[in-house]
Image (spheres, helix red, strand yellow):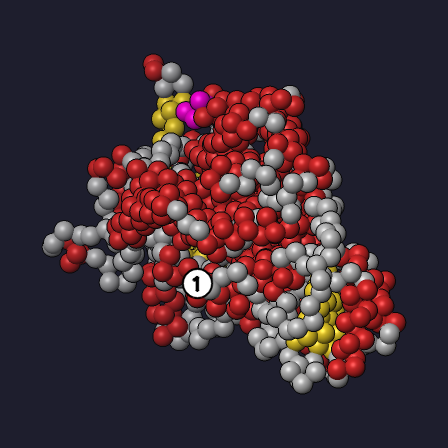
Amino acid sequence: MSLFSRFLDGWRKYRKPGYYEKFDYHWTMTVDLDKCTGCEACMMACQAENNIPVVGEDEVARGRELQWIRVERYWEGEYPNARLRFMPMMCQHCDAAPCETVCPVSATYHNQDGLNTQIYNRCIGTRSCAVYCPYEVRYFNYYDHGWDSPLEQQLNPDVTVRGKGVMEKCTFCIQRIRQAKDLAKDDDRRRVQDGEMQPACVQTCPTKALVFGDRNDPESQVSLSMDDPRSYRVLDELNTDSSVFYLKKVDA
Amino acid sequence: MTNNVVGLFHDPESALTAAGELKGAGFESLEIMSPVPIHGVEKVLGKKKSVIKNFTFTGALIGGMSGFALAAGTAVLYPHPVGGRPIITMPPFLIISYELTILFGILATVLGFIVSSRLPAFRNRVYVPEAAVDKFVVTAPCDDAEHYQRAKAILNAAGAEQVRKIRGDDL
Amino acid sequence: MTTPTERNDLGYNDIHEDVVRSIVKTGPKYYIALATAGSVTLLCFFFPWFYQLYYGIGAAGMNHPGVWGTYLSSFIFWIGLSHSGTLLSCVLHLTNSSWRKAMYRSAEAMTLFSLVVAATYVMVHVGRPWFIHWALPYPNQMELWPNFRSPLLFDVMAIATYITGSTIFIYMGSIPDFAAVRDRTSGWRNTMYTLLSLGWRGTDKEWHRLHWAYTFLAVLIIPLAVSVHSIVSWDFAMSIVPALHQTIFAPYFVVGAIYSGTAGIVTVMFVLRKTMGFEQYITKLHFDNLGKLLLVLSLIWTYINAVELFTGWYSGSSEEYEALGYKLFGFYAPLYWEMILFCAVAPLLMFSTRFRTSFVPMLILSIAINIGMYTERFLIIATSLSRQYLPDAWGVYVPSLVEISIMVGSFALFTTLFLVFVKIFPSVSMYEVKETMATPKIEPLAPASGSPA
């Protein structure tokens, strides 16, 4: 009987969609499009923080740039009345991510913090995750990219340098999250407090258009921000259950 | 090692007739070697039952179960949630199970074939190379010269082109 | 059934001699062909591949929206080509169609080698092929297993099963022929065939067992082959990319696979007939039957294409509209209309019996169909990936020289493997061709001799 009930318990647990009752932290970002000026400082900050290689002019012309966050530009209307819209686009850390299911070697999975993680060591480079991602935010290392001396001196020691044939994407600066969690653990096992850590893009945004935090904490800035009536998720109709919310006042 | 009498025939019908008559004359463990499968052998030499289907069925069954066990077991051993799906995700695991059903079914069929037809056999056995080209050959073990003469008479009467004895200098 | 009159002049022995001759007697033409195919493989396939291994996938033309390219379309193409060999052979075996018998051995070989080339393409495709074994389920120290939820892993399992199954199927069917060739060869060939034939003697019991084993294999392989290409289609259909996320993809791919595979068989049969001197065994009848099959398949294929367009249009979603319009009138539109011409319009010629029974037009059409089918696989990937949800990430993918070279080289690789095959395997199934012929007439009896030979 006990074996049977153990089996039944396991079955219930493992047949539960999503597996986690609740993530330890549920890291979430909001992007206030009404505040975004399209300055692309977030892109630069990300490049510096995450050791993203500069691929060079030719490779960019071939569409092989690496940018974990990009600012998409959309024009509305014709010339005299043209308006420019910006939309920063980074990995949406979907809770029902299409990219995770397709990886044959489980190089990308969902961790206990609700993050969509990418394991560079495990990646064999089928690039299927990039196809399955509707947001097109996964970038592939087509070559081994180097850094001209002395630029290699400024690499972030906390972030892996990726080799050729590996997929990479925004991690919500997982190295900073880990550091904050470690500090919090050392400091009497408390939880990471709101605003204690920020990804590089959030830290650098001059207009504070980006807000980052733990959705599980109802008092956090991001929880308040994502409950804003302007809030929506990109391609929400695909049911990816993404963790990035965009705020935009609909023009009347 | 037993001695054998072999008769070479030009067509399957007379080979079958000869085999039938040999059988009627009390010869046992007859074999017919032929370049093509002969239809109607079972009428003469008796119906054969092959165990291959049991192998195939068992293999497919084991394959189906082990396919699901492989997928579900490994997922449970190292649970990492993927795409908001359950750890034991039925539809894809059933596909794995389906593929392994067929794989194990195929391998078991081969095993069944090898076991039931007593192959591979690299030891010396009664064999007539012409049987692979265009002759239909009836073979029967026979112990002594008297048996051999009897068999030879029957084979010749049925229209054998040639009758040989194999591995029997003392006949 | 074949009309026996066609082959009345041939005896069992003639076939035997013809087939043994095709294995043992090797002319200079064969060596020239083998050397050419081998060196083209080396130069066009392996050399660019090593270059790509060294520098990274960047050697190919893939870019940001178009992360999949011709490597994958070639993979589907080769898997598709593999479909008519073993699958067709199994169906015809179970339905007792005797016209299959002269050609099925080479058709099965085609399956096997297409699969080998396809499996090689997987390694060419991935970014880090030196870790490709991580996609296989084997116990390891890290206790880490592959992700069985991934359509790509279904592929791994299905193709591994398919390669195993079709190797066993072709081998099983060849055992009696290995035995027949064994007795006529000497030296290393004799040793090889002795081992390969497992000591087959052709006794009634062995034939009985072989028949059943072969039938069970055929029964198992038909659902396997259908599942293999369904699974390949799910690599695409399980995504949420507009124009890839289609329910009809599984039957579409299966039909497309059989279609291109059958066309491939026509090509191979034509070549075999001309080069190996098998004019008596591969006849107009085979081309006629294959032509009918091709015609039916082309009609089904056209229908599914129409349905695909219709459902895309009927969905009414802007992404589907965009993907559809791009496919029909966008950057790749000339390729699309070429595909329609080669795979939907040109095959209508086969309504004419005269066309079906003429060898050279059938050869040209079969090649055209396969060019069209290759284009189809390319378009499925290229057009869909170029127009996905976010317009900012739209782009165009064009194959690079390395990719084109590897594609050419893959055909040479296939040819090399096939050339090696015809010298090892009896490329016409002797015992089954013998079966279709009238049994030898009784000649005046020679005086029987009782002495041991």
User: Is A173 on the left or on the right of B141, as rendered?
Assistant: left
Q: Which residues are magenta?
A: C330-334
| Dominant SS type (magenta) | loop
* x and y percentages locating residue C261 in the rendered image: 56, 40
* x and y percentages locating residue A5 in the rendered image: 72, 76
- Residue furthest out toward the left: A150
The amino acid pointed to by label 1 is His
State whether residue B107 appears in this view.
Answer: no
For residue C339: magenta?
no
User: Which residue is located at x 68 percent, y 40 percent?
Assistant: C8
- Residue furthest out toward the front: C447
* Position above or below: C66 against C332: below
Which of C401 and C432 lies nearest the eye of the viewer? C432
Which of A223 and C112 lies nearest the eye of the viewer? C112
For residue C333: magenta?
yes
User: Which residue is located at x 34 percent, y 70 percent?
Assistant: A183
Which of C183 and C308 lies nearest the eye of the viewer? C183
Badge 1, how many Cα within 10 Å: few under 14, some, many 20+? Answer: few
Quarter holding the N terminus of chain C? top right
User: Is A147 on the left or on the right of C109, as rendered?
Assistant: left
Chain under callout 1:
C
Determine the secondary structure under disc 1: helix
Which quadrant of the structure image shows residue C179?
A: bottom right
* x and y percentages locating residue C110 in the rendered image: 52, 47
Which of C448 and C41 lies nearest the eye of the viewer? C448
User: Which residue is located at x 61 percent, y 32 percent?
Assistant: C284
Residue at numbered disc 1 = C133
* Position above or below: C185 against C66: below
User: Is C162 on the left or on the right of A203, as rendered?
Assistant: right
